Amino acid sequence: MEMFLLLIISLLTLFVSVSSYNVPAIFTFGDSIFDAGNNHFIKNCTAQADFPPYGSTFFHYPTGRFTNGRTVADFVAQFIGLDLQKPYLQVEMEIVKGIRRSYPSNGVNFASAGSGVLRETNMDLVSHVPIPCRYVTGTAFHAHQLSFLTFNVGVTQGVMSIQKQLQQFQTLRKLNKIDKKLIRQSIFLFESGSNDIFNYFIPFEPPTLDPDAFVHAMLTEVGNFIEQIYKLGARRIAVFALGPVGCVPARTLLPGAPITRCYGKMNRMVKNYNLGLDSLVKDIPNKYPGAVGVYGAVYNIVQQFRLTPKHYGNATPLHVLYIRFSNTSSACCGDGTLRGMLQCGKEGYKICESPNEFLFWDYFHPSEHTYMLISKALWGGKQSWIRPLNLKTLANITLTPS
Ligand SMILES: *[C@@H]1O[C@H](CO)[C@@H](O)[C@H](O)[C@H]1NC(C)=O
Ligand SMILES: *[C@@H]1O[C@H](CO)[C@@H](O)[C@H](O)[C@H]1NC(C)=O
Ligand SMILES: *[C@@H]1O[C@H](CO)[C@@H](O)[C@H](O)[C@H]1NC(C)=O
């Protein structure tokens, strides 16, 4: 009987948590931080995470996500009570094959690993790397350069830029494959820019723009994205800052980057970009009547983990978060200095025993534990983590008609 009551109570809470938010769907745009498997469906593209041990902690098989489990986009969906959003290219394939007839009612994930907010960054690299987006083989390269090149090759072709992702969404909207009312109630997640900034430090070609002008060009693209997504009907828009990209273990691939500390020059660009995002979001209510924008200060959240890797419970500035990292500098999975010189899963990789004790899962990407803590901070966090509203409030507000 007790068990039965418990079951009923938990079913009731489940029901309540599913029905209490007025958000039917999530549409996700960005890079490998959010990619749920889109790149797996891009032929010959090397920016992949569709092999073991990716996904091994949570899904227990590779899904194309660049971590050992769920991403921030996944956690947000779960907090709202929605099923995880499928990759756009998977949905397209299922429709072509006749496995499904319509687009999912819980939203779509358009994010593509290796992509950026600037199209030019990647085009510039093509002339210097005359290899298409397929796996580089051969012994002409030193292992160090090989992983360096495969990363770049992955970036140069095949991946879907933020403009391309927008175009895909626009097409679905124009063809009325996604209902306008659904779009209006949905949450839109945006996170992109770390590939543009990381590429800025790759010495194939001296950058033509100085750091400030480069960041400015990036922000112009984000501004356009917000405008377009609004015009297509988006009203709840969440823009996430970049984390400290200069701290990723993969910085060891860059000549001149420090090993024992983060790459300050890179983090300075990231911080400038983030400041720009913050002010773009502040402008949303003025420029776009009826829309609500929130800015997630991911950089500050991650820096908190690095500063206080072992805080438990209410004593932490994150309140109910249980932060416990034994290692905030190296990747769990990879090889070379900081395990940042070889992609996880590639021949010769090494892996740690407890991935979720690591801030970084692989050379570029956080572990699922890191993503979970970030998600909690964004979901229920205070103004210094996410502003002017947290995601929980964003999901529960009533939109004003416009
Ligand atoms: C992928 O690579 C194969 C083998 O190199 C090539 O024949 C094919 O045309 C490529 N496909 C695309 C879409 O680039
Ligand atoms: C972090 O993990 C790497 C890889 O296992 C190891 O070499 C390094 O010593 C660890 N650092 C700390 C501070 O535990
Ligand atoms: C949503 O907001 C209403 C008040 O407008 C409140 O009663 C309700 O508890 C909130 N739901 C959640 C899940 O926070």
Image (cartoon, grey):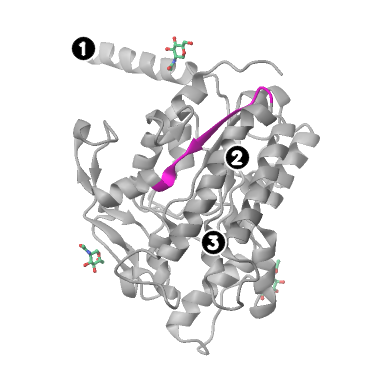
Residue 35 seen in render:
no
Circle 2: element type: helix
Does the magenta segment cover residue 111?
no
Q: Residues within 10 Å of mark 2 (few under 14, many from 20)?
A: many
Circle 3: element type: helix
Q: Residues within 10 Å of mark 1 (few under 14, many from 20)?
A: few
Q: Do the residues labelled 3 and 2 touch (CB within 8 Å)?
A: no
User: Which image quadrant for residue 214?
Assistant: bottom right
The residue singled out by tag 1 in the image is 2
Distance from label 1 to label 2 (Cα)? 53 Å
Along the line of sight, the residue nearer the viewer: 51 or 192: 192
Q: Which amino acid, mark 1?
A: Glu
Residue 91 seen in render:
yes
Q: Which amino acid, mark 3?
A: Ile
Label 3 near ligand 2 (CB < 8 Å): no
Q: Give the range drawn in magenta.
A: 289-299
- Quadrant of image for the C terminus: top right
Circle 1: element type: helix
Which is in the foreground here, disc 1 or disc 2? 2
Please indicate whether residue 29 sits to the left or right of residue 244 in the image.
right
Does the magenta segment cover residue 295?
yes
- Quadrant of image for the N terminus: top left
Q: Which of marks 1 and 2 is nearer the N terminus?
A: 1
Which is in the foreground here, disc 1 or disc 3? 3
Question: At 38% from the left edge and 45% from the top edge, which residue is drawn?
Answer: 300
Q: How many marks?
A: 3
Question: At 19% from the left edge and 34% from the top edge, which residue is drawn?
Answer: 315
Q: Ligand 3 is in which quadrant of the figure? A: top left
Residue 269 in the image, given as x and y percentages of width and height: 50, 58
Which disc, if any, is residue 280? 2
The residue singled out by tag 3 in the image is 197
Residue 115 in the image, given as x and y percentages of width and height: 60, 58
